[in-house]
Image: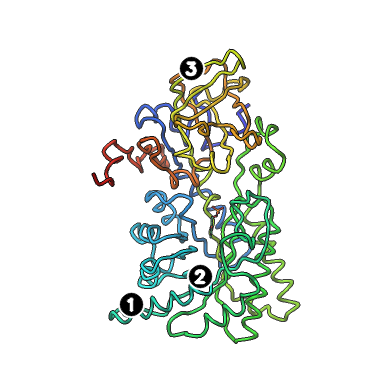
């Protein structure tokens, strides 16, 4: 029987090795070095198709804007673009990348709590689909940007803006990944929403208020927070229409569709129940859309406003659900030691938290397998750690809060040079890497249809470690 982490046609065991869309993981390490990020183009396309099928099933205009913060490597962005969906950016840099790779301005939305004048100018000048406004103050900043650019002789249209709300909706995800709580730093609170919309409608020659937005958080395991957020936005849309006659064009339900990090549950019983529920979530995009539309339809009927609901476009900003399970990290065991006092065997790899920050700051669980002996019995316990000079660079919970298993299960007698693989590492990893300890950042490859492999990120050199230093 195949191990539970396998996915037919994508992640398989061939000749004892891990195989990614038919490409041998060990050969990849031989060719491109270790550690190595490996992405699958067919899997990215599969994940995007799953979203499109959900849209077809609810038969609504739905605009998917890939949350590029999850992974904005240019080849990944290009794959997303070619799959026919749009993009969400979170900074001037991500806006630059999205435009450079070929997204059209009307395919781009821009979130952010602290946008600089230059970033707003870039978004206004490009004429993007929507700038998501994070505070009442920021409406004025966008108006000033329009004035500033026009004063310079630039012929810019009124900027399209969407107001981001923070309605106090909790989820069963990590606190750091919940973004609709009043204690979070994001958005405009419910008590201020109507006055914020009135403010947004004051200068239609400068800004056009086109939508409303809530992102409840990332890795949201249940459908209810999405439905509650959608209902809340829908009710504001109706209230604004009644009060001002202005009709919002879209409701943006944000990202947060979860990924099942625990397809293989062999280590799951060591995790606390709430972590298990969150990390092992199975929530189909179709369920999210159906339930959101069901509650909105109920409310629309009661308010006699079904015609408004029929006109509205729904936006989603999926990141993790597109890229997380399409990427993995291959890492090599570089050192081994035993501790006679505890009888622990320690494996020291070349993949630290500088390339997978979530493993440290959220104690995020990435399932670990042997890529060299993929189908052997996973019956032996190892302490596993990365290469950084930091006690926290370990694959268990150094704080002893049990958020990661104390030991990782691997085949017997793992030795230096064995290649391991951390699965589901495609989101919030490559995008968050840093050079700590003078470690050049790793290469990345994209496996395409027909087993073609393209390098999509070169391995940094030592020269690049000092390229920005002035000395
Ligand atoms: C505003 C916004 N939209 C979308 C996302 C993407 O979320 P996810 O990757 O969980 O789909 C995030 C990330 O948390 C976000 O902050």
For residue 334, what is the image quadrant? top left
Sequence-wise, which precedes: disc 1 or disc 2?
2
Sequence-wise, which precedes: disc 3 or disc 1?
1
Contact between marks 1 and 2 (CB within 8 A): the answer is: no
Q: Residue 372, relative to residue 135: is it above or below? A: above
User: Toward the viewer: 17 or 139?
Assistant: 139
At mark 2, the secondary structure is strand
Q: How many other residues sit within 10 Å of disc 3, few (<14), some (14-19) or many (≥20)? A: few
CB of residue at label 2: within 8 Å of ligand 1?
no
Q: Residue 430, relative to residue 245: is it above or below? A: above
Q: Position of residue 347 (x, y in %)?
A: 51, 22
Judging by the rendered image, the residue that carries numbered circle 3 is: 415
Residue at the image position 49 percent from the left and 57 percent from the top: 66
At mark 3, the secondary structure is loop
Q: Is residue 1 left or right of residue 41?
A: right
Which numbered mark, 2 or 3, is in the foreground of this view? 2
CA gap between label 3 and label 1 equals: 62 Å
CA gap between label 2 and label 3 equals: 53 Å
Judging by the rendered image, the residue that carries numbered circle 1 is: 149
Q: Quadrant of ligand 1?
A: bottom right
Residue at the image position 62 percent from the left and 28 percent from the top: 406
Q: Residue 38, relative to residue 319: is it above or below? A: above
For residue 289, what is the image quadrant? bottom right
Q: Is residue 110 left or right of residue 196?
A: left
Q: How many other residues sit within 10 Å of disc 1, few (<14), some (14-19) or many (≥20)? A: some
Task: Check the image and name the residue furthest to the left.
Answer: 471
At mark 1, the secondary structure is helix
Judging by the rendered image, the residue that carries numbered circle 2 is: 133
Q: Position of residue 220 (x, y in %)?
A: 64, 52
User: Toward the viewer: 71 or 47?
Assistant: 71
For residue 211, what is the image quadrant? bottom right
Sequence-wise, which precedes: disc 2 or disc 3?
2
């Amino acid at each position: 029987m195949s191990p539970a982490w396998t996915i037919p046609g994508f992640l398989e065991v061939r000749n004892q090795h891990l195989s990614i869309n038919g490409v041998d993981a060990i050969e990849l390490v031989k060719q491109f070095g270790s550690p190595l990020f490996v992405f699958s183009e067919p899997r990215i396309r599969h994940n995007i198709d799953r979203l499109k099928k959900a849209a077809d099933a609810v038969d609504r205009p739905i605009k998917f804007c890939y949350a590029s913060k999850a992974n904005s490597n240019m080849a990944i962005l290009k794959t997303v673009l070619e799959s026919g969906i749009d993009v969400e950016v979170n900074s001037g840099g991500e806006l630059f990348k999205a435009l450079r790779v070929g997204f059209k301005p009307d395919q781009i939305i821009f979130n952010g709590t602290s946008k600089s004048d230059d970033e707003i100018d870039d978004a206004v000048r490009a004429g993007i689909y929507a700038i998501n406004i994070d505070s009442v103050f920021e409406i004025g900043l966008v108006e000033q940007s329009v004035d500033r650019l026009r004063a310079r002789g630039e012929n810019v249209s009124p900027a399209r803006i969407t107001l981001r709300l923070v309605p106090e909706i909790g989820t069963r995800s990590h606190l750091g990944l919940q973004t609709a709580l009043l204690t979070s730093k994001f958005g405009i609170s419910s008590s201020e929403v109507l006055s914020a919309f009135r403010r947004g409608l004051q200068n239609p020659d400068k800004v056009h208020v086109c939508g409303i937005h809530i992102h409840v958080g990332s890795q949201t395991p249940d459908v209810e927070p999405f439905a509650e957020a959608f209902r809340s936005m829908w009710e504001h849309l109706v209230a604004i229409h009644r009060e001002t006659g202005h009709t919002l064009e879209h409701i943006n339900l944000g990202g947060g569709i979860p990924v099942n990090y625990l397809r293989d549950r062999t280590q799951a019983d060591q995790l606390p129940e709430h972590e298990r529920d969150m990390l092992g979530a199975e929530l189909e995009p179709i369920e999210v859309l159906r339930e959101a539309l069901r509650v909105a339809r109920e409310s629309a009927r009661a308010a006699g406003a079904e015609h408004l609901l029929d006109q509205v476009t729904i936006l989603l900003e999926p990141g993790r659900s597109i890229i997380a399970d399409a990427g993995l990290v291959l890492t090599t065991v570089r050192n081994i030691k035993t501790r006679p006092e505890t009888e622990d065997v320690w494996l020291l790899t070349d993949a630290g938290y500088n390339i997978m920050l979530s493993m440290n700051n959220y104690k995020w669980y990435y399932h670990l397998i042997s890529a060299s002996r993929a189908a052997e019995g996973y019956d032996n316990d190892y302490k596993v750690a990365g290469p950084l000079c930091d006690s926290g660079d370990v694959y268990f919970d150094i704080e002893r809060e049990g958020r990661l298993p104390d030991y990782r299960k691997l085949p017997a007698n793992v030795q230096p040079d064995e290649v391991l693989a951390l699965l589901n590492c495609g989101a919030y990893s490559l995008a968050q890497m840093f050079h700590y300890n003078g470690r050049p950042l790793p290469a990345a490859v994209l496996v395409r249809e027909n087993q073609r492999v393209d390098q999509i990120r070169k391995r940094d050199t030592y020269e690049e470690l000092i390229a920005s230093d002035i000395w």
